[in-house]
Image: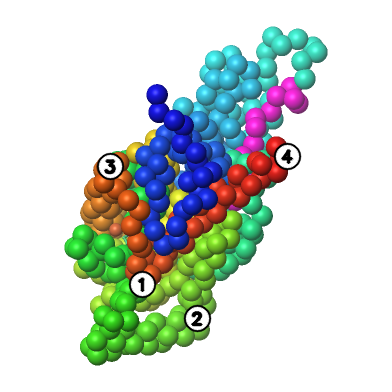
């Protein structure tokens, strides 16, 4: 039998600016720890408000061994509950998305109201105290329509900072007045951290994403100083000037645009709004808006792209005409779900204001290409020849931020469990 791996020792000896040691990508034991420590204690992006627009609308989300039921109440607020009956534990809502009145368990009819209080439980006798059998709650926060949940008893409080910052950036895109045009679920054959690492760089873009012409500039040019010959320096300066001019213009009309980076916070995030390449308008193959109905109060299609990345599991792109959000959920050590949602103005009519293929093409292709790269990275990490390799300081700094954050969170967990044990 194999010796169990010493996870605290692996965490302790992780070298900065290098990819992680193989067990972080392959070991089911580390995946279990990731689910418990990372996905169990942090704010996880799980969906958008337009997925449950009306009171009574409900969606379910599965993370590891937890199923969460998100329900919009009559007061329009979204509540989160463990999706398990307090009688004999049947799963309450089995659908991914549905509309309900009260939450009624199919097994023996125990009924909970929208606040999760048990209001009906027949044949339990006079002594039975319903008030002790309400549904277990889950923390829910909506940032301008993006839904985050936290499964821990005490959720990280620095969410306030992310919420305060991002409300201002996202609000003009008016998520509450959008609808889901399309949602895709892609299973990548790789560890969730490879999905995230891949997302945090565009080193691979030029060689792998022929359709992703527009967002490339969002990742900067990433040249090392010795690569910067005269022509490229001029290009970089021209782009930097374009960014300064665009920021001045957008900020003047109420669109926060400058970069905000808090990647070492417990609730780590980064955001910025940047011009799209070739004066593009949106993330489409022809770089023009995909939907004629612009979002919010926009009357100008050329507002660049606002991007928002969060630790540990999401990224988002906001354009003048549509929004694309990505939620990453580990399924096993080497399988990961990437759920992508395209939002357009709620009054936009398919076939008239937008065409679904045109709307979804860039990210459908790009996701598929990324999935294939993640698969290759997973296969490589399982080989005996694999050794952690160096991240580029010029094109992969955000990969390092993610890896350092992840290792830091595991370290904090081990430190805390040691203190508690002492
Ligand atoms: O923007 C993204 O979402 C990342 C970065 C480059 C490729 N990609 C999937
Ligand atoms: Fe839900 Fe019995 S398990 S009512
Ligand atoms: Fe990519």
Does any atom of ligand 1 lie closer than 8 Å to the CB of label 1?
no
First of labels 1, 2 by sequence position: 2
Q: Secondary structure at mark 4?
A: loop
Q: Position of residue 351 (x, y in %)?
A: 25, 55
Q: Secondary structure at mark 1?
A: loop
Give the alpha-carbon distance from disc 4 to disc 1, as whole Å.
43 Å
Disc 1 versus disc 3: nearer the observer: 3
Q: Secondary structure at mark 2?
A: helix
Q: Which mark is residue 394?
A: 1
Does any atom of ligand 2 lie closer than 8 Å to the CB of label 4?
no
Q: In the image, is 37 to the left or to the right of 394?
A: right
Disc 1 versus disc 2: nearer the observer: 1
Q: Secondary structure at mark 3?
A: loop
Give the alpha-carbon distance from disc 2 to disc 4, as whole Å.
52 Å
Give the alpha-carbon distance from disc 1 to disc 3, as whole Å.
29 Å
Q: Is residue 250 above or below residue 392?
A: below
The image quadrant that residue 79 belongs to is: top right
Q: Position of residue 268 (x, y in %)?
A: 54, 59
First of labels 4, 3 by sequence position: 3
Q: Residues within 10 Å of mark 3 (few under 14, many from 20)?
A: few
According to the image, label 3 marks what residue? 384
Q: Which residue is depicted at the point 50% across and 41% down?
A: 7
The residue segment tinted magenta is 130-141
Q: Which mark is residue 251?
A: 2
Q: Nearer the viewer, residue 416 or 9?
A: 9
């Amino acid at each position: 039998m194999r010796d169990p791996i010493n996870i605290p020792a692996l965490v302790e000896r992780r070298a900065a600016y290098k990819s992680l040691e193989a067990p972080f990508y392959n070991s089911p034991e580390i995946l279990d720890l990731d689910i418990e420590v990372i996905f169990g204690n942090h704010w996880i992006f799980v969906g958008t408000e337009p997925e449950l627009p009306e009171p009574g609308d409900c969606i379910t989300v599965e993370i590891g061994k937890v199923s969460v039921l998100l329900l919009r109440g009559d007061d329009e607020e979204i509540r989160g509950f463990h999706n398990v009956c307090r009688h004999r534990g049947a799963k309450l809502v089995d659908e991914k998305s549905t509309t309900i009145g009260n939450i009624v368990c199919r097994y023996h009819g125990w009924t909970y109201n929208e606040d999760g209080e048990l209001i009906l439980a027949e044949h339990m006798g006079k002594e039975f105290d319903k008030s002790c059998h309400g549904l277990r709650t889950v923390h829910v926060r909506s940032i301008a329509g993006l839904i985050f949940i936290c499964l821990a008893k005490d959720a990280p409080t620095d969410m306030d900072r992310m919420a305060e910052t991002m409300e201002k950036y996202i609000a003009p895109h008016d998520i509450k007045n959008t609808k889901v045009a399309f949602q895709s679920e892609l299973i990548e054959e790789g560890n969730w951290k490879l999905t995230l690492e891949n997302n945090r760089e565009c080193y691979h873009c030029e060689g792998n994403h022929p359709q992703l012409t527009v967002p490339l500039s969002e990742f900067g040019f990433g040249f090392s100083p010795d690569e910067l010959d005269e022509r490229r320096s001029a290009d970089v300066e021209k782009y930097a000037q374009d960014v300064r001019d665009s920021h001045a213009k957008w900020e003047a009309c109420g669109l926060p645009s400058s970069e905000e980076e808090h990647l070492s916070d417990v609730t780590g995030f980064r955001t910025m709004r940047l011009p799209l390449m070739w004066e593009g308008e949106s993330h489409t193959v022809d770089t023009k808006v995909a939907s004629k109905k612009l979002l919010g109060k926009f009357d100008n299609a050329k507002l660049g792209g606002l991007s928002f990345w969060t630790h540990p599991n999401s990224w988002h792109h906001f354009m003048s005409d549509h929004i694309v959000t990505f939620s990453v959920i580990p399924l096993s050590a080497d399988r990961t779900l990437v759920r992508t949602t395209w939002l357009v103005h709620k009054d936009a009519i398919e076939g008239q204001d937008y065409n679904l293929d045109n709307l979804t093409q860039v990210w459908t292709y790009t996701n598929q290409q990324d999935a294939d790269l993640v698969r290759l990275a997973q296969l490589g990490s399982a080989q005996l020849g694999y050794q952690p390799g160096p991240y580029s300081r010029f094109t992969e700094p955000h990969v390092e931020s993610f890896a350092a954050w992840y290792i830091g969170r595991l370290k904090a967990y081990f430190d805390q469990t040691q203190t508690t044990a002492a």
